[in-house]
Image: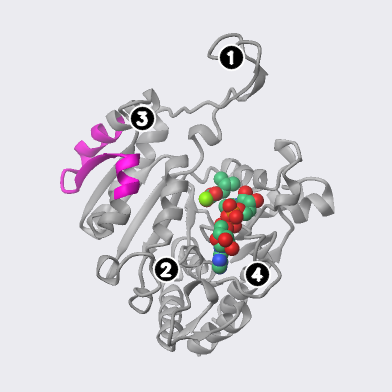
Amino acid sequence: MKIAVLPGDGIGTEIVAEAVKVLKALDLKFELETAPVGGAAYEAAGHPLPDSTLKLAREADAILFGAVGDWKYDKLDRPLRPEQAILGLRKALGLFANFRPAICYEQLTHASSLKPELVAGLDILIIRELTGDIYFGQPRGRRVATDGHFPGAEEAFDTMRYSRPEIERIARVAFEAARKRGKKVTSVDKANVLETFQLWKDVVTEVHKDYQDVQLDHMYVDNAAMQLVKAPKAFDVIVTGNMFGDILSDEASMLTGSIGMLPSASLNDKKQGLYEPSHGSAPDIAGKGVANPLATILSAAMMLRFSLGQAEAADRIEAAVKQVLALGLRTPDIYSEGTTRVGTVQMGDAVVNALR
Ligand SMILES: NC(=O)C1=CN([C@@H]2O[C@H](COP(=O)(O)OP(=O)(O)OC[C@H]3O[C@@H](n4cnc5c(N)ncnc54)[C@H](O)[C@@H]3O)[C@@H](O)[C@H]2O)C=CC1
Ligand SMILES: CC(C)CC(=O)C(=O)O
Ligand SMILES: [Mg+2]
C-alpha cells in the first residue's frame, strides 16, 4: 500500500507529521512517500503542483494531504497560487465526492459554539460535490464591462455550472450513504434564484426515484445555514454543490467544537481518495505548535477505511481519539475550563499512546 504524503504549507506540515506518527504506530505495512505541494512546491520548483507530485498522487493508493496557501502568495497569478494545487489535484484525479462528517464527540459538547443540548450526539454527513460549480466553471476572467451598472469599468466574472451527470453521480453517492445510515438526505440549493440549482433540484428529485426508502428534503442554502445553528440534529446527510458545501462545512465544524476536528475524504469512482482536514493552512497559528491535529488524524482513519481496506485500524484510531479527549487533553481551539491544554505534538503523542 502506497500513501502519498503531501503536507503543504503552514500548519499542514505540523498536523500531517502527527497523522503520519499515528499511521506508523499501527504496525501495518505502508510505503509512505512525501512530496512538496502548494507554496512549498512553488518555492522549491516554481509551481504549486509539480509534475512529480501529481505523478506520485496518481500512482498512490491514497493521498494524505495537509493544507496549502499563505497570505504572502496573494499577489501571484491564479495558476501559481498555492490553492491551485488542491483544486488541481481534485480535478486531475476526478475526486468529485467530498465527505465531511461533522460529529460532536461526547467530550466536546461544551466546546461547541452551540448549547450542549443542541449538539449532544450530533452526527451529520456533508457530501459536497468537489469538481464542478463556480470553482471550476469556465469562462472566467476580467474584462471591461460593456453593459451592467458601470459600462466601461473593469469587471470580473466566474461561471456557475453543473451538468446532469455531475449532479446525478453525487446524488447517488448521497442516497447510498443515507441508505447505510438509515436516515435522510437534505439537498441544499439556491433553486429559487439560480438556473444551475434548478437543474440540481430536478436531477436530485429524479435520482431519488431509485431510493424511495430514503427520505429527501430540499432546502435553500440561506435557510440551511440558519437551520444548522438552530437545530443541527434535524439534518442527517446534506448533499450540495462545491461552494455551498465549502461554506456550510466550515459552519458545521463549529458545532463539533472546532474546524480542527473536521476530517474529510475526497473520492473518485475508483475509490482512490485524498484525505485532508477540512480547514486550511492557518497562517495565523502556523509554527506555534498549537494547531489541532485531530482532523488530520481522523482523515487518516477515513483513508484506512475507504481506500486501504483497513476498517479495523480506522476504528482503532477513532477510539484512540475519543480516549484522548476523555483524558481531558485539548489543543487551544477546543480548550474549556477543567481540561488540560496541550500542543500539536503532545496531542499526536497522546493518540499514539492510546493506540498501544
Ligand atoms: N484544502 C486547503 O488546502 C485549504 C486551503 N486554504 C487556504 O489556507 C489559507 C488560510 O485560510 P483561512 O481562510 O485562514 O482558513 P483556515 O481554515 O486556514 O483558518 C481559519 C481559522 O481556523 C483556525 N484553524 C484552522 N485549522 C485549525 C486547526 N487545525 N487547529 C486550530 N485552529 C485552526 C485558524 O487559526 C484560523 O483562525 C488560505 O491561503 C486559504 O486559501 C483554505 C481552506 C482549505
Ligand atoms: C482552495 C479552497 C477551495 C479549499 C477549501 O476551502 C476547501 O476545500 O474547503
Ligand atoms: Mg473550505
Q: Helix, strand or loop at disc 2? A: loop
Q: Nearer the viewer, residue 120 or 183?
A: 120
Callout 1–callout 3 Cβ contact below 8 Å: no
Q: Earlier in the sequence, mark 4 or mark 1?
A: 4
Mark toward the viewer: 3 or 2: 2
On the image, numbered disc 4 is attached to which residue?
31
On the image, numbered disc 3 is attached to which residue?
197
Neighbor class of circle 4 (other Cα within 10 Å; few <14, some 14-19, many 20+) is: few
Position in image of residue 239 (x %, y %): 34, 45
Q: Nearer the viewer, residue 48 or 332?
A: 332
Neighbor class of circle 2 (other Cα within 10 Å; few <14, some 14-19, many 20+) is: many
Residue in the picture at 56% in, 83% down: 342
Q: Is residue 246 visible?
A: yes
307 left or right, relative to 120: right
On the image, numbered disc 2 is attached to which residue?
257
On the image, numbered disc 1 is attached to which residue?
150
Q: Earlier in the sequence, mark 4 or mark 3?
A: 4
Residue in the picture at 49% in, 43% down: 130
Q: CA distance from mark 4 to mark 1?
A: 57 Å
Q: Earlier in the sequence, mark 2 or mark 1?
A: 1
Residue in the picture at 48% in, 69% down: 298
345 left or right, relative to 279: right
